[in-house]
Image (cartoon, rainbow, N blue to C red):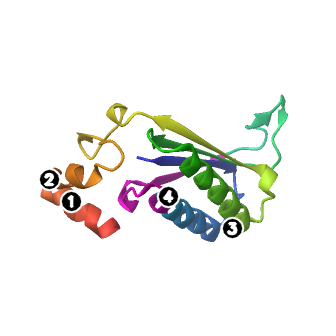
Amino acid sequence: MPTYACSTTAGRLSEQQRSTIVESITAIHAEETGAPRYLVQVIFYEVGPHAHSIGGQPAPEGQIWIRGDIRSGRTEAAKRKMLERILREVSDATGAPAEEVWVYLCDIPAFNIAEYGRVLPAPGDEAAWSADLPESVRARLQSLA
């Protein structure tokens, strides 16, 4: 957690664009929330032509839709800054007009999420949570930090 799902028309993004988006979203989330980078997931979904509609019409072919499921407890100011940065950086990375990049941040209480075999902690309690993980998991997470 958090998990950012990026949906685009099939073939819309190059590998370099995906890589840039992954790095941007990971950095933005870690910088704006203080959460460890190893918790940030970015998943890409490609849909076929006419598989995404807006207002009953096919979405623009360049449309990029990002849904970020994040732990609740973030301030409105922090979420707004994250939204603005993701919007700008994804637009810059892809050449998509800002109006075709839609970003949603959805709050989920930490006690409704389990990862690495444990229920996630509240924001800010990651260090104690990480210390309680099995050594093999902690070693893997350190390589992602």
| Residue 132 to residue 111: above or below | below
Name the element at disc 1: helix
Number of marks in the image? Answer: 4
Residue at position x 36%, y 59% from top? 36
Q: Check if mark 2's residue and mark 3's residue have beta carbons within 8 Å.
A: no
The magenta span reads 30-46
Residue 34: in magenta span = yes
Q: Where is residue 52? Give x, y as percent.
A: 74, 38
Q: According to the image, label 3 marks what residue? A: 93
Task: Work out whether mark 3 precedes mark 1 in sequence or the reverse, and give the earlier one.
Answer: 3
Query: Residue 32, which numbered label?
Result: 4
* Cα separation between marks 1 and 2: 6 Å
Q: At label 3, which amino acid type do we have?
A: Ala
Task: Work out whether mark 4 precedes mark 2 in sequence or the reverse, and give the earlier one.
Answer: 4
Q: According to the image, label 2 marks what residue? A: 134
Q: Residues within 10 Å of mark 2 (few under 14, many from 20)?
A: few
Name the element at disc 2: loop
Q: According to the image, label 1 marks what residue? A: 138
Task: Work out whether mark 4 precedes mark 1 in sequence or the reverse, and give the earlier one.
Answer: 4
Question: Along the line of sight, which residue is nearer the eye, 12 or 27?
Answer: 27
Residue at position x 32%, y 33% from top? 111
